[in-house]
Amino acid sequence: MTGTFTAPKGTYDVLPPASATWLAVVDALSAPARGAGYGYLVTPLFEDTALFLRSVGESTDVVSKEMYTFTDKGGRSITLRPEQTAGVMRAIVEHGLFRGQLPVKVWYTGPNFRYEQPQSGRYRQHVQVGIEAIGTDDAALDAEVVWLGVQAYAGVGLTQAELQLTSLGDATCRPAYRDRLTEYLDTLDLDSDTRRRVRINPLRVLDDKRPQVQAQLGGAPLITDHLCPACKEHHETVRGLLTDLGVAFVDSPRLVRGLDYYTRTTFEFVHRGLGSQASLGGGGRYDGLMESVGGPALSGIGFGLGVDRTMLAVAAEGLTVADDARCAVFVVPLGATAKRRAVALVAELRTAGISTDLAYGDRGLKGAMKAADRSGARHAVVLGERDLEGGSAQLKNLATGEQVTVPLADLATTLLELS
Ligand code: HAM
């Protein structure tokens, strides 16, 4: 077979120079967590399928419809991770990290895989930057995690990310609320598919975007009116702490997340510039998650921020997050002796911290200068045989065309002064 290939449906390549923005976004999204005692954790791209069934929840779309699951050559059922929180819990339990200082605080980044219908902002491979803090249900930790998310987007430079916040209650109050909501939904005119969803998870029906469903939901009971005293107090404390921190949030009692493990504090960052895939990132507390993967009954809280959608939001707001990865200096050797010296010179300049590239391919002055112009470098260093004999080089400002002779020994210092 011959022919070319394209990236698999729902995936894409991140090419230079835009990839410089990608790297800067990952850096900015993770910087607040790195500055708050979160350690970097790397987990495998694939896990035992049962891990996701037990944690993310079998009733979710993510697990029931979207997982990349296969049997490996050893006969094990393996799934490419659709998200990273489950793997983080597995690693913390497996390595007993919960026996040390609590809360355990980690951050991570990497790709996740969901077999979704691709559209702008929705892909089959997406990358998140996330954090998890496990081992205390202190509301101050909720405030920290939410605040770190706010800081993450601020660090990228986004100004139009809205924080939506609610509490989903816990095992004490949610079941009663769920019954109430089911009773209410049963009185509505819903199609059979939606009725089925009411049985599986009635909360998710609140999130149904179709106007004919939304129009009937006006009188639906809201979880925040049915929290038990402990959840209510927790929620009020989190809201108060966020207000003290100057964090703007929108109370969003209808907020529903796509994963089943959330309890109490739940939040999402939404960006109006993103169209239908508006969720930039989200997270929340999860009381029973660690237990569900065989660990102790420790509560935790975390978030996952989508890098792909953050890139789209950066474009929607017209931000420049990174200089592209061009070199500052382009070295042009003329002739074989100069070439040999140029290879050493490039190494010297790079070692001195000056980003430098070389005209490869022995193109002659005209072709090499064209390459220098195209490279986007600010300066070209032209190394001719005669210059070399005199121990110097021509330093050319590619924007102004101005050219000076500089002794090779002074070149690095001169370039550093100019940068
Ligand atoms: P999630 O809401 O499923 O949460 O995903 C987090 C973010 O990942 C979304 O807000 C979105 O930006 C991005 N994302 C998800 N799916 C896609 C997709 N198909 N294409 C592009 N971007 C996508 C979680 O995954 C949780 N593990 C977050 C968390 C951590 N909760 C607690 N700790």
Image: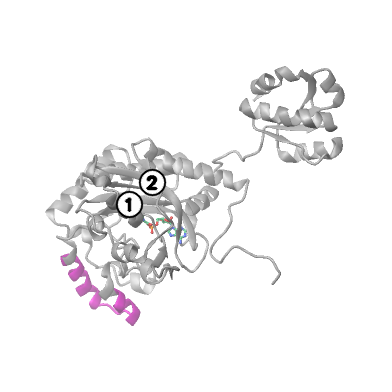
Question: Disc 2 to disc 1, how far (Cα)?
Answer: 9 Å
Q: Is residue 191 above or below residue 138?
A: below
Image point 20% across, 68% down: which residue?
178
Residue type of the residue flagged with mark 2: Leu
Residue type of the residue flagged with mark 1: Ala
Q: Quadrant of the N terminus?
A: bottom right
**Residue 204 x/y as whole percent:** 31, 67
**In this orientation, which residue lies closer to the viewer: 3 or 36?**
3
Q: Quadrant of the C terminus?
A: top right
> Which quadrant does ligand 1 occupy?
bottom left
Q: Secondary structure at mark 1?
A: helix
Circle 1 is placed at which residue position? Answer: 91
> What colour scheme governs how the chains and residues are painted in the rendered image of this protein?
one colour
Query: How dense is the environment of label 2, judged by Cα within 10 Å: few (below 14), some, or many (20 and up)?
Result: some
Q: Secondary structure at mark 2?
A: loop
**In this orientation, which residue lies closer to the viewer: 323 or 229?**
323
**Residue 87 x/y as whole percent:** 35, 55
Q: Earlier in the sequence, mark 2 or mark 1?
A: 2
Which is the main secondary structure of the residues drawn in magenta? helix
> In terms of image quadrants, where is residue 353?
top right
Q: Is residue 17 above or below residue 186?
A: above
Q: Is residue 323 above or below residue 170?
A: above
**Residue 64 x/y as whole percent:** 37, 71
**Residue 39 x/y as whole percent:** 36, 40
Image point 29% across, 69% down: which residue?
217
Classify residue 30 as left or right of residue 285. right
Tags 2 and 1 touching, CB below 8 Å: yes
Instruction: Please report the bounds of the magenta region as a residue range.
Output: 176-197
